Image: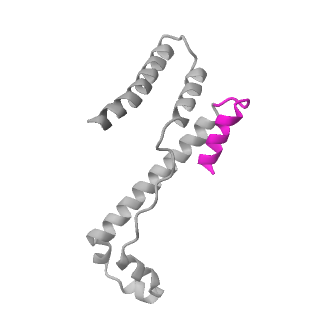
Amino acid sequence: MAAIKDIIKTVLPKAEKMKNLLKDLYTSKITMGEFNKECAYWLISCDNLHPLLMPTRPYKLQEYDRMNDNDKYKVPHSFWRRPQIFKYIDQGNSVKGRNQGMLAKLIEYRDYIPEQDEMTRSKYKVLIN
């Protein structure tokens, strides 16, 4: 129960801030540029920006990797439908997609941070590189 209270304490204020920013944008109190800048500052404050690690490669797939090309050609199509192989490929594609999407967002939002704010831009640089 304490964990839920901690989450509520940290997430709700951020959600409320975003709600207020959207309201200000909708009522023209702020420009789109100001909205994007605030979103960029909010994004860099999030905890889950680091790339996810790829799942562990199944042993059968490691064996496949060690085969020569002629032996790989002989592997039946059913090999790729094995649950552990299919799950690995599916999870790997999800991780790659999430990481590529996050990298694109970080690159995009870094450009909304003013050049003078070197500290925040350096946080973006660390995550991008």
In the figure, is residue 106 to the left or right of 20? Answer: right
Q: Residue at x 56, y 27 (%)?
A: 36
Q: Nearer the viewer, residue 1 or 16?
A: 1
Which image quadrant is residue 32 in?
Answer: top right
Q: Residue at x 31, y 81 (%)?
A: 76
Quadrant of image for the N terminus: top left
Q: Which residues are magenta?
A: 113-129
Q: Nearer the viewer, residue 81 or 129?
A: 129
At which x and y percent is residue 19?
A: 42, 20
Residue lying farthest front? 2
At which x and y percent is residue 28?
A: 53, 11
The relative height of residue 46 versus residue 81 in the rendered view (above or below) is above
Which image quadrant is residue 2 in?
Answer: top left
At which x and y percent is residue 22?
A: 46, 19
Q: Residue at x 40, y 82 (%)?
A: 63
At which x and y percent is residue 95?
A: 43, 55
The relative height of residue 81 versus residue 117 in the rendered view (above or below) is below
How would you classify the magenta stretch by its main secondary structure? Answer: helix
In the figure, is residue 128 to the left or right of 45? Answer: right
Indicate whether residue 28 is drawn in magenta. no
The relative height of residue 71 versus residue 57 in the rendered view (above or below) is below
Which image quadrant is residue 90 in?
Answer: bottom left
Indicate whether residue 114 is drawn in magenta. yes
